[in-house]
Image (cartoon, rainbow, N blue to C red):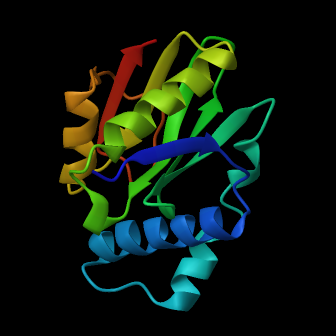
Amino acid sequence: MTTWSMRAERFDTADATALRRDYYAEVAGRYWRRPATTAEVAEGLTGDGVERLDAPTGAFVVGRHAERAGACGGVLLLDTDTAELTRVYIRPGLRGTGGGALLLGTLEDAARRLGAKRMVLNTRQDLIEARTLYSRNGYVAIPAYCQGPYMDVWCGKDL
């Protein structure tokens, strides 16, 4: 049985960058109901604030399955007690292999090390796989804590 490994990694390594590109291509393409172009993905990643996913304001994690990068996610401190889960992505061919729960656990541990006592997130209605992952791992609906054009659902969990 192939296992997952998770570790903190800078958001700008080759593997992290490739995963972030795949993440953006998928969520943008699903939103637009067509494949996102390379230029659209590059534009979406420009100035997206990913640099905050590094100490002391956050953390970024890359997951590997059979030594190949297959998942990523970040946490961002919103205040001294609350961290936001962001950019959670598991490559489609690896979904259902246990990596999602392990990734969330690793990100929750990173948030605790940053001092967070609560994790929040926002997502969209159409991202069924993400919503299912969050629900299965104890995230429940909460009132909106932020606003934006790509947000339909807000969830939280005490750490």
The residue positioned farthest toward the right in the image shown: 56
Marker count (numbered): 0
Say which of 134 and 113 sits in front: 113
Say which of 118 and 146 sits in front: 118
Q: Position of residue 63 (x, y in %)?
A: 50, 50
Looking at the image, residue 19 sits to the left or right of residue 17; the answer is: left
The residue shown at (20%, 51%) is: 96
Query: Based on the displayed image, in which of its 4 quarters is residue 35 positioned?
Result: bottom left
The residue shown at (37%, 66%) is: 27
The residue shown at (62%, 78%) is: 43
**Can I make out residue 149 in this image?**
no
Looking at the image, residue 18 sits to the left or right of residue 130; the answer is: right
The residue positioned farthest toward the front in the image shown: 1
Q: Position of residue 47 (x, y in %)?
A: 72, 64
The residue shown at (54%, 79%) is: 41
Vertical position of residue 110 compared to residue 6: above or below? above
Vertical position of residue 99 compared to residue 41: above or below? above
Query: Based on the displayed image, in which of its 4 quarters is residue 154 positioned?
Result: top left
**Can I make out residue 63 in this image?**
yes
Q: Position of residue 115 (x, y in %)?
A: 67, 12
Say which of 10 and 29 sits in front: 10
Vertical position of residue 31 compared to residue 139: above or below? below
Q: Position of residue 59 (x, y in %)?
A: 67, 37
